[in-house]
Amino acid sequence: MQRTQVTDHPNCLKSLPGLLIVGLSLSLLFPTPSPAQETQSKSQPTAQYELSKVPAQVSDRQEKAEICNRLGADHHQKGEHKAAIDCFRQARRELGIEYRNSLKAAKILTNEALAQAALGQGQQARECLEEVTQIMSATRGQDFEKSIMLNAAGKVELTLGDPLKAEVLFSQALALRAKEPEARDKNAFSPLLNLGAAQLALGEFEKSRSNLVQALNLARKIWGTSSEQALAALISLVTVDQELGELQNARNELAEATEVAGQLFGPFHEKTQVLKAWQIPNNTGKTLGEERSTIKPPR
């Protein structure tokens, strides 16, 4: 089957950039943005200004490192990636040389890689990931923490345009999470969703659909039908079913996604409007509603 790039559906992707290149990180170990959050660039406050928010009474370097890491994650969520990188680097400095090869350092490095990838700085992002890989290879146990970093590394590769490498990393993350008996379903959601996105980009539509359906079922079971997790899976499924020619499925999923977006963000929010404007062709090649109305959908 010929591979099709996910960018064939620009109306949705331009306004919902995180929903197909997905990655809901559900971990509390190191904060990362949800796919429904915008990443438009804003003014870049300096790390020195932001790091002044670290309470003066905090003297423990490990605690300072975690505060800096969380400040960096906050910047990354807001699209302030340069400031985020400064915070992550300060966090590593606070850890000190004795923790240079610890899992804490690897988590911070993974966050920096995500921020570097968001800026399109592929070489710097992969240098961070190489160091993370070295740390993980020297660390025994901690399968769940390793799976989180593999999942994040896959997001980096997907963002940088290498879905094949991303597919391998997401599969490895999913395999490690399967070993965890506690909260297995919840932990499996993010790598399943991301794996489906990578396979979608590769043109492996049947595999993608299978994983995305599993992710959607988990989202509905754990977080409910009107959750951001369910919305992310639905939007990816719309694209997959269009590629497979399952247009009625795509219409049903798009209708549900639009309803969920309206509940989450409001009926007039940009994300909801983009979904309302997403047109699915029918079997004759005309878009849905084209024969019934001349009213143009909202932009």
Image: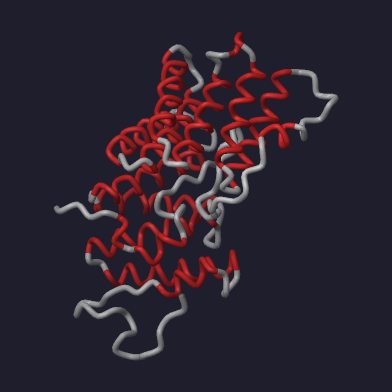
Q: Is residue 151 visible?
A: yes
Which residue is drawn at the image coordinates 19% and 52% (left, top)? 3
Q: Residue at x 80, y 19 (%)?
A: 59
Q: Position of residue 86 (x, y in %)?
A: 60, 31
Asked whether, in this view, residue 249 is left or right of residue 76, the answer is left
The residue that appears at 48% across and 36% down in the rendered structure is 116
From the top left corner, tell me how far across and down residue 24 is, in percent: 50, 46
- For the point 42% across and 41% down, the residue is 120
Residue 240 position within the rendered picture, expressed as x and y whole percent measured from the top left: 30, 58
- Count of numbered badges drawn on the protein: 0
Left-right relation of 243 to 223: left
The quarter of the picture where residue 241 lies is bottom left
Residue lying furthest right: 57
In the rendered image of this protein, does residue 93 appear above or below residue 212? above
Q: Which picture quadrant has residue 265?
A: bottom right
Taking depth in this image into account, of 237 and 39 the one nearest to the observer is 39
Foreground residue among 113 and 198: 113
Q: Is residue 260 visible?
A: no
- The residue at the far left in this view is 1
Residue 272 vertical placement versus 129 (above, below): below
